[in-house]
Image (tube, coloured by chain):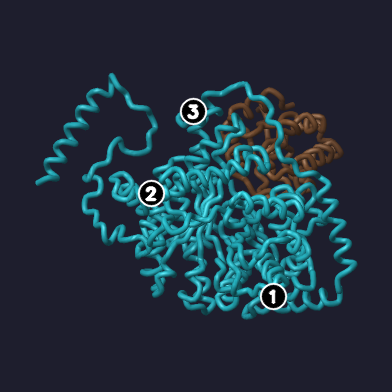
Chain colours: A brown, B cyan
């Protein structure tokens, strides 16, 4: 029996805007993935802990507060430290286009900016998950 | 009878239209009826349903002359980076014609953390100004006379602390608290349900809120002690009816808490205020505003038996819907905001913030915020919309829709009452689930093109990267951290310890009003993080259930 793809949808930092994270989480669930939503105010440590214990294939980070350049690379680095090198890390929220190259260099595979249909996220995951 | 004749005519019209629909189809997914006639408001009674502006049930407005006397306050929400930077922006806005101030604080400040706390990393100054102590607050209001300006502060869990800081700054300027005009948002229930900047659990949070009601009723009588908010509930995805229903349910919970704490309703109700969203569907928003005033008036007079007319009045600040701004073709947002402004003005708002065109991407620059302010000024001075009180009153559509939204709101309020009130409804996740359902429905409508968003799922272009966006430098965190080191070195640390110890003891006794002790602590230059740290210690932290 094929194992279903497991996705952690996480809200790092202090940002409380969760409409997008919840909509994406539900769309992913409807698309057949197993989804774990962390809720708000996750430290990088908590996100790593959840990724490990839930044995996820994808970590989807949602952030609208402008702290993405600090928190996203930190989370990717910590995942790698724990040996989770095959985990696909994606991000979304209020992230200026100008910051995306830096985030990708840091190991975020794709960044989904405002206006992205959930269908695109689903497609990307299916095409890129290991 | 005239009605029978009209009924027959409308029936004939409808039959003719429906026959022709095959050849002349109507656009799909239109939420309201094709046409409204007197038949849609049968039984409408002007005097009981509308009355006159400034009189119960205030459907037509809370002031007798509305904008003919004075325009709504043009109050632009602003703040970013350091107090020095934000002070400049406040003075720019006032010079440009803003008639009230509105403070945006960064997330560490909103959540009671100093800029040097571990949780503050990457967040300092990003979504608002960083305020770590009274010292920052003094800089924030430099060259601004607190005796002459009214200031709204979007601060919730630590509202008591920021209010105390504001009072302390004013005192230094020689302005006594009774002369202060302004608002603190101070609405923790919507934080749990939709916005996320809570700190403490519900019980101690309600205590802080009622402490503020009581303290202000005696000492800061011209201050709006709370801005019971629907804006964020709507931004989180709710419908218009849900926006006002859930907010009014929260309002009911606050009134009940204050009465339980021993206050007389008329001693605090006149200083409760509200905060609505100005969303895209212009006429639906107007009906929503009107319905909200009627519902609250009935709640206060009939349910809570308030005696003073001021206690029955729903006074509201409004913000244009941030969630409706697009990152695509950002100039289009200027048009959206203009329409949303029309909605808020026709709806009778007391105060308005208009978003800037670049706010789907970043905080506004001086240039883009100026256009947003000019939008209000153009509507005020050039459009004629502010020249007649409740100009849409009497429209068959507007009255029918006002009634419909009112009825839907009562349904939700009844449901929440049955659950046990807003606090329980939030603890059980009812309000959050309703909001999520509406949010998901909206997104699916957009993805299925049942709902068109210009530039996003239709009329797209190859986007060019937007230039000249405001960026908050990462060095702000370091700047604030250095300030804290200096502050701790030069203040009287013994006095700080003493004040914090007194506050801690008082927190443990639920009969003590904490405001005077918070004010004492603030004046010793205890930091926001230190004061909230004491409260965290005694009250604990709210553990949010991760509902999906």
Q: Is mark 1 on a helix, strand or loop?
A: helix
The local crowd at label 2, few if under 14, some if 14 to 19, many if 20 or more residues have their Cα within 10 Å, is many
What residue occupies the far right of the structure in this picture? B489
**Count of residue discs:** 3
Query: Which residue, given by chain and number where applicable, does mark 2 sit on?
Result: B287
Mark 2 secondary-structure assignment? helix
Nearer-the-camera pick, B317 or B92? B92
In this rendering, the answer to whether B450 lies above or below B320 is: above
Choose between A31 and A105: the one closer to the eye.
A105
Alpha carbon distance from label 1 to label 3? 53 Å
Image quadrant in which the C terminus of chain B is located: top right
Identify the residue at horizontal 65%, vertical 56% (top origin).
B103
Q: Mark 3 = which residue?
A: B448
Where A73 sits versus B427, above or below? above
Mark 3 lies on a secondary structure that is: loop
Q: Which of marks 3 and 2 is nearer the N terminus?
A: 2
Q: Which residue sits furthest top?
A: B23
Marks 1 and 3, the one that precedes in the sequence = 3
Locate residue B264 relative to residue B542 in the image: left or right.
Answer: left
Badge 3: residue crowd in 10 Å (few <14, some 14–19, many ≥20): few
Left or right of A74, for residue A25: left
In the image, residue A62 sits, relative to residue B22, either above or below, namely below
Judging from the image, mark 3 belongs to the subunit labelled B
């Amino acid at each position: 029996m094929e194992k279903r793809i497991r996705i952690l949808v996480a809200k790092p930092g202090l940002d409380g805007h969760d409409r997008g994270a919840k909509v994406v989480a539900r769309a992913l669930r409807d698309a057949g993935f197993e989804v774990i939503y962390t809720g708000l105010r996750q430290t990088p440590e908590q996100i790593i802990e959840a990724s490990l214990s839930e044995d996820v294939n994808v970590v989807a980070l949602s952030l609208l507060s402008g702290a993405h350049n600090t928190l996203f690379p930190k989370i990717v680095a910590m995942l790698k430290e724990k040996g989770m090198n095959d985990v696909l890390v994606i991000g979304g929220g209020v992230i200026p286009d100008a910051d995306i190259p830096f985030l990708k260099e840091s190991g975020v595979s794709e960044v989904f900016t405002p206006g992205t249909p959930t269908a695109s996220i689903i497609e990307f995951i299916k095409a890129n998950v290991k | 009878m005239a009605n029978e004749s009209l009924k027959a005519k409308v029936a004939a019209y409808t039959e003719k239209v429906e026959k022709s629909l095959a050849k002349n189809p109507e656009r799909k997914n239109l939420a309201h009826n094709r046409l409204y006639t007197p038949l849609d408001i049968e039984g409408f009674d002007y005097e009981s349903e509308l009355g006159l502006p400034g009189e119960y049930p205030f459907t037509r407005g809370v002031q007798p002359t509305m904008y003919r006397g004075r325009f709504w306050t043009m109050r632009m929400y602003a703040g970013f980076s350091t107090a020095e930077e934000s002070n400049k922006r406040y003075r720019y806005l006032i010079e440009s014609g803003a008639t009230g101030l509105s403070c945006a604080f960064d997330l560490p400040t909103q959540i009671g953390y100093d800029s040097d706390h571990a949780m503050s990393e990457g967040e300092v100054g990003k979504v608002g100004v960083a305020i770590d102590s009274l010292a920052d607050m003094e800089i924030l209001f430099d060259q601004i006379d607190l005796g002459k300006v009214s200031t709204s502060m979007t601060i919730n869990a630590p509202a008591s602390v920021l209010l105390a800081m504001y009072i302390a700054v004013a005192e230094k300027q020689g302005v006594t608290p009774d002369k202060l005009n302004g608002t603190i948002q101070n609405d923790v229930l919507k934080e749990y349900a939709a916005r996320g900047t809570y700190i403490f659990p519900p019980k101690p949070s309600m205590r802080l809120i009622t402490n503020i009601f009581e303290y202000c009723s005696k000492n800061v009588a011209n201050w709006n002690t709370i801005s019971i908010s629907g804006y964020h509930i709507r931004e989180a995805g709710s419908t218009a009816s849900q926006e006002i229903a859930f907010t009014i349910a929260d309002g009911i919970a606050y009134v009940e808490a204050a009465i339980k704490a021993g206050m007389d309703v008329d001693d605090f109700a006149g200083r409760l205020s509200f905060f609505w969203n100005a969303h895209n569907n212009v006429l639906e928003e107007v009906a929503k505003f009107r319905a909200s005033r009627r519902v609250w008036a009935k709640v206060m007079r009939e349910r809570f038996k308030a005696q003073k007319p001021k206690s029955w009045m729903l006074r509201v600040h409004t913000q244009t819907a941030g969630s409706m701004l697009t990152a695509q073709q950002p100039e289009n947002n200027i048009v959206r905001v203009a329409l949303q402004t029309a909605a808020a003005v026709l709806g009778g708002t007391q105060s308005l913030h208009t978003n800037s065109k670049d706010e789907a991407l970043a905080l506004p620059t001086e240039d883009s915020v100026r256009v947003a302010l000019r939008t209000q000024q153009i509507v005020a001075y050039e459009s004629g919309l502010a020249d007649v009180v409740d100009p849409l009153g009497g429209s068959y559509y507007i009255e029918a829709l006002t009634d419909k939204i009112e009825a839907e709101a009562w349904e939700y309020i009844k449901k929440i009452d049955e659950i046990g009130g807003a606090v329980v409804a939030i603890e059980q996740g009812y309000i959050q689930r309703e909001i999520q359902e509406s949010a998901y429905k909206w997104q699916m409508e957009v993805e299925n093109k049942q709902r068109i968003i210009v530039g996003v799922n239709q009329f797209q272009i190859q986007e060019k990267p937007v230039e000249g966006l405001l960026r908050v430098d990462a060095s702000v965190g370091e700047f604030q951290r250095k300030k804290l080191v200096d502050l701790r070195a030069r203040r009287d640390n013994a006095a700080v310890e003493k004040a914090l110890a007194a506050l801690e003891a008082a927190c443990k006794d639920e009969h003590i009003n904490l405001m005077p002790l918070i004010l004492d602590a603030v004046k010793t230059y205890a930091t926001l993080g230190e004061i909230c740290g004491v409260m965290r210690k005694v009250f604990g932290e709210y553990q949010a259930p991760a509902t999906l």
